[in-house]
Image: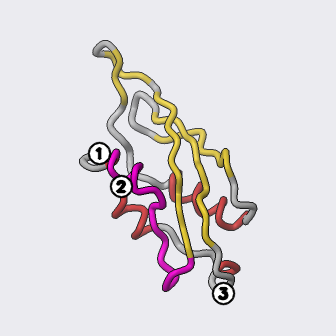
Amino acid sequence: MRKYLLNTIRLPDNMQDGGWQGRVYVQFIVRKTGKITDVEVFHSINIPSADKEAVRVIENMPDWIAGEHNGEKVNVRFELPIGFKESDYDWILGCPQIQQQFNGLTF
């Protein structure tokens, strides 16, 4: 997932010279089919172009493996912090604790 985010997120033009940094928190549902739906920002850094980019990237993410409960596939709500900072205009997944949770995650 980290590789996908690093390769896909693009720094909005209006952020390239401002020294901006922060995290946009996005929530979405992984459906029984593995499709991602209902993507929305639930914590913004008040930069609309950053919110829009975070949503775009999650909406275009490859399908995930569906969640299971008691052997049956279920819809799962997921929250993901998308961290970014102006540092050679690279975006990063912003939270090391979250990165550790995603090690080995397949989608």
Amino acid bearing label 2: Met
Q: Where is residue 70 in the image (x, y as percent from the top left)?
A: 31, 12
Name the residue tied to disc 2: 1
Q: How far apart are marks 3 and 2 (CA)?
A: 27 Å
First in residue order: circle 3 vs circle 2 = 2
Q: Is residue 93 left or right of residue 37?
A: left
User: Relative to 47, does residue 78 appear above or below in the rendering?
Assistant: above
SS assignment at label 2: loop
Q: For residue 96, which quarter of the picture?
A: bottom left
Residue in the picture at 64% in, 81% down = 19
Q: Nearer the viewer, mark 1 or mark 3?
A: 3
Q: Name the residue under label 1.
A: 105
Find the residue positioned furthest to the left: 104
Q: Which stretch is magenta?
A: 86-101
Quarter of the image for residue 39 reads top right
Residue 33 in percent (x, y) is at 39, 32
Q: Mark 3 points at which residue?
A: 17
Question: Depth-wise, is mark 3 or mark 2 nearer the camera?
Answer: 3
Report the residue that reaches farthest toward the front. Answer: 97
Q: How far apart are marks 1 and 3 (CA)?
A: 34 Å
User: According to the image, what is the colour scheme of the structure?
Assistant: secondary structure
Q: Which of 36 and 40 is in front in this view?
A: 40
Q: Is mark 3 on a helix, strand or loop?
A: loop
Vertical relation: 69 (above or below) 96:
above
| Relative depth, front residue between 73 and 81 | 81
| Rendered position, 35 above or below 15 | above
Left/right placement of residue 99 relative to residue 95 reads: left
Tell me residue 56's x, y (percent).
57, 58
Q: For numbered disc 1, what is the local secondary structure?
A: loop
